[in-house]
Amino acid sequence: MSTKRTGAQIFLDCLEREGVQHIFGYPGGAVIDIYDELTRRPHIKHYLVRHEQAAVHAADGYARASNKVGVALVTSGPGATNTVTGIASAYMDSIPIVVFSGQVPTHLIGNDAFQEVDIVGITRPCTKHNYLVTDIKHLARTIHEAFYIARSGRPGPVLVDLPKNVQQASIVPEPLDPKEIRIPSYQPTVHANPRQVRRALDLILQAKQPVLYTGGGIIHSNASEELLKFAEALQIPVTSTLMGLGGFPGIHPLWMGMLGMHGTYCANMAVANSDVLIAVGARFDDRVTGRLDAFAPHAKIIHIDIDPSSISKNVVVDIPIVGDCRDALHQLNNLLKKEEPRDWAALREEWLGRIREWDRKHPLKYKKSKEVIKPQFVVEKLWEVTGGDAYITTEVGQNQMWAAQFFKFKRARQFMTSGGLGAMGYGFPAAMGVQVAKPDAIVIDIAGDGSILMNIQELITVVENNLPVKIAILNNAYLGMVRQWQQLLYDKRYSATDLSAQPDFVKVAEAFGAVGFRATKPEEVEPVIRKAMEIKRPVIMDFVVDREECVMPMVPPGKATHEMLLA
Amino acid sequence: MEAKKNRRHTISVWVDNQPGVLSRVTGLFSGRGFNIESLCVAETMDPATSRITLVTSGDEQIIEQIIKQLRKLINTQKVVDLSELDHVEREMAMVRVKAEDKSRAEVLRIADIFRCRVVDVSPTTYTLEITGNHEKIQAVLSLLKSHGILDIVRSGTLAIQRAKKE
Ligand SMILES: Cc1ncc(C[n+]2csc(CCOP(=O)(O)OP(=O)(O)O)c2C)c(N)n1
């Protein structure tokens, strides 16, 4: 094996060694050598997106659905800058992706060369790590490090910038096993400290009103089974963040629904009244806590997270546990086996009874209508018709919250949303990535009429590649969530949120070669959904919904969670 | 809740000696709204490693966050909060002071008391090199001020842990 290989060849050799089968990308002068080499790699399928932002969101959706690292490939300059939103979204949501960008040749770097941009500088604050490869000798190791960093510890996006001359240079590569990659200065703590776990369990065993508050960490660490076991064993009610949805079954008696700004009354009340709050893979985001000093004011807090910097960042905790969520829950379950068995159902009766009472008083609800389509009704029907099995992605705004509230997720990795960044335009390309990872599954982007236009060009990508993604537009002809704030907090001054000027989405679908349906009356909703699910092609379902419907409950920004507005 | 007390902390950070690492560190401070009072960086005995000494201030929770965020950087090898340990701090300043007829002797006297070195002389000025901890430098500067400081350059703080004395 002493033949020379070019940088472009080494690049694709590395991807093959990492088991990459799918990449999302867009070519240009600075990556033309890689694209040329790609023609000789039948095992890697490239999806040509129509905007680089979509490549990154697609890689993100792919990573979430498949539990593998997602890969995007773009050219220098504008190709690279177009990826920034996607990278920032993956960073906020801790999604393992690697973005490869072309760069001008090393001798031109810093010269304001054509299509030169300092993408490593630009993405430094929104990547877990990034690299500029200046020497072909470091190329292979850097690529494997990038994959390793993206997937290990708290996952996240890594960018690797590849100057054109590095792709064109050639060397005799040294043999390298990606499994051997070690970075001395990067050693995430995976195994939770058993003494801390013991302390946590002792506290939990004494709790009268415990609550499990779970986040995306449950999904990333594949901890759902351990979570279910633990919650059931001790009869502890569970709520989760937006990112944690699916980590606990949405139709379980211990499930309280999402917490936070648009969480359920019972989840927020349970947290407010808890005496021990067990946070697992969640980060006390302001959308969850509301006014900080009123968040779980009586609770002792246990916080399990793989990222030490998440712990005691916003809320000072009593028992910090650094480690992988699944590892920590596994240890808790093991310790529990050795405990004297107790009748937890009986011991918990009063606490769970109070929670049921809160739920009875203020369940998630909306005013049903026979005249207009209620957006929540559409989500309920999507759930019903798909048997709750569909993969759901969302855009951002009301559509996202209604999806979170009314679709009862069965399992982890079934729900993909831009939670931390809240990037409109995420849902559709992410759905495309999910569909690539799960070719036979039903994948639905629950969308708003505003957001869907942010990456509508991808219709041609799904048509071209026979990806039968479904888009359900909850069309209120408004930037609905902003309008809701204007209604409730700005005296109904609807500034720049009216989207009455909009395209005919059915014709848009048809123009791209997809299928379009419209429903304007409640009785049309189910037939439209059924028809769409039967067609093995991309479909837009345009649901013309009640324009001024609001997402409720709502904790107004800066308020305490118990000050929530109710439906 | 107790009032949050801000304290000055001197933190040592060992990092990979690579391009861009310093900007990861400073970017972290500006991006997260932490303040840096001073920062010094140079290679260690191992050319693959640089050591940064930085001075910052904040309450306990902020300092804890700063240290955790520094550790989180992939290129960070080790972070030590020297303020928690017995350590020695030094800064250096070079000051050009007006020194004419009557004040010439006085400036030299101050320099002598504080063990400053005269590193440059002109008929109307002395340039002094002052080393010491933060407080000492402040003290010398306040004495020299009345004579007229024409130019000044100061280093950040360097700090090293004291050896264990068994
Ligand atoms: C890229 C981007 N720009 C702006 C916003 C601010 N924003 C949040 S929700 C929202 C309205 C979204 O409207 P639409 O997609 O129609 O969804 P709806 O709320 O009506 O369901 C806007 C503008 C954002 N989240 N992302």
Image (cartoon, rainbow, N blue to C red):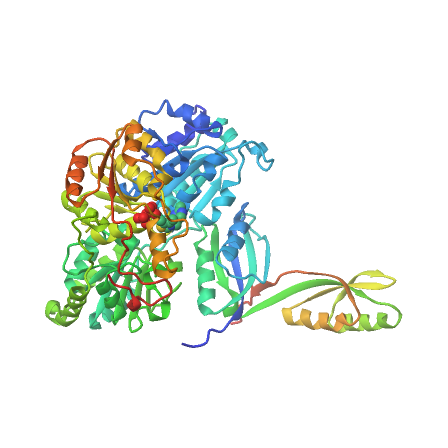
Is A246 drawn above or below residue A143 in the view shown? below
Is residue A450 toward the left or the right of residue B5 in the image?
left
Give coordinates of residue B158: x percent, y percent. 60, 62
Q: Residue at x 26, y 29 (%)?
A: A466
Taking depth in this image into account, of A109 and A117 the one nearest to the observer is: A117
User: Which one is in front, A409 or B150?
Assistant: A409
Decide if residue B27 is in sight here: yes
Quarter of the rendering occupied by the N terminus of chain A: top left
Figure quadrant of residue B128: bottom right
How many numbered tags mark residues here? 0
B118 displayed left or right of A465: right
In the image as oriented, which residue stretches furthest toward the front?
A371
Which residue is drawn at the image coordinates 36% and 57% (left, top)?
A492
Locate residue A284 relative to residue A332 in the image: left or right. Answer: right
Vertical arrangement, residue A323 with respect to residue B82, above or below:
above
Residue at 47%, 29% in the rendered image: A167
Q: Nearer the viewer, residue A318 or A336?
A: A318
In the image, residue A542 lies at what x, y percent?
25, 39
Residue toward you, B73 or A526: A526
Is residue A285 something one can see in this rendering? no
**Residue A270: quadrant of the picture:** bottom left
Residue A139 drawn at (x, y percent): 46, 35
Query: Would residue B112 appear left or right of A514 to someone viewing this image?
Result: right
Question: In x, y percent, where is residue B120?
Answer: 80, 60
Q: Please, is residue A537 above or below residue B126 in the view? A: above
Q: Please state, as top left, top right, bottom left or bottom right, where the C terminus of chain A lies in the image.
A: bottom left
